[in-house]
Image: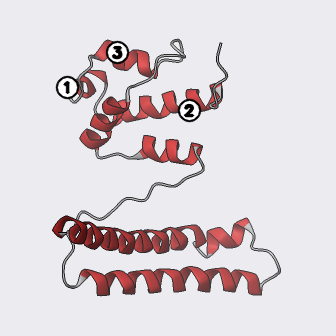
Amino acid sequence: MTLRPSSDIERAQLKAAFRKLVRKCGGGECAAEATRVGQPALSRYGSNSNPNDHAPIDVVLDLCLDSDDDSLIRTLCRMVNGAFVSLPKQSLGPTTWTSGILDAVSGTTAAADAICRALNAGEQVTAQEIADQQIIEKLQRAIEALVVLRLYADQVAATAEAAE
């Protein structure tokens, strides 16, 4: 037996996320129409009775795209100490840099302001202050805005490389 870095609990959480994804697609029959596998295979992939039978990554991709749901990807990202940030479905245009910078600055300012307000009340930021000041939501908006700027930079760099 090989030692796997993932735990039984993590693999069970992936199966639970997979079951939710199949439900988002309208159930096993509907989900099977979006993938290369049939309903029995989808059932096995989500079943805790089959602990070593997991969905192939291309099947997960098909279901995520079909349902427009990224929750399983977010679950997987959290398991590897990462975060998933959805990217905008717009193309790079002349105003996107300016609006992207404005979004990043305003998002970062709002998050920093909320944290500073919470810190004014004491040395530690409490869970209640995080909820009251919507700190997590503000941080998420700032992160997403910065990722969008990164996307723009990647697109420009890729275009330049392709032209060379």
Cα–Cα gap, marks 3 and 2: 18 Å
Residue position marked by numbered label 3 in the rendering: 41
Cα–Cα gap, marks 1 and 3: 12 Å
Residue position marked by numbered label 1 in the rendering: 33
Element at label 1: helix
CB atoms of marks 2 and 1 within 8 Å: no
Q: Residue at 37% x, 32% y: name it.
A: 57
Q: Quadrant of residue 62?
A: top left
Residue position marked by numbered label 2 in the rendering: 13
* Amino acid type, callout 3: Ala
Side of 37 relative to 54 (left or right): left
Tell which circle, 1 or 3, labels the residue nearer the N-terminal end.
1
Please say if 79 is above or below 28. below
Q: Residue at 51% x, 55% y: name it.
A: 83
CB atoms of marks 1 and 3 within 8 Å: no
* Amino acid type, callout 2: Gln
Element at label 2: helix
CB atoms of marks 3 and 2 within 8 Å: no
Q: Residue at 35% x, 30% y: name it.
A: 22
* Amino acid type, callout 1: Glu
Element at label 3: helix
Tell which circle, 2 or 1, labels the residue nearer the N-terminal end.
2
Q: Residue at 78% x, 84% y: name it.
A: 121
Give the tally of numbered discs.
Answer: 3
Please say if 50 is above or below 23. above
The x and y percentages for residue 159 are 21, 69
The x and y percentages for residue 70 are 38, 47
Counting other residues with Cα less than 10 Å from the Cα at mark 2, is it few (<14), some (14-19), or many (20 or more)?
A: some
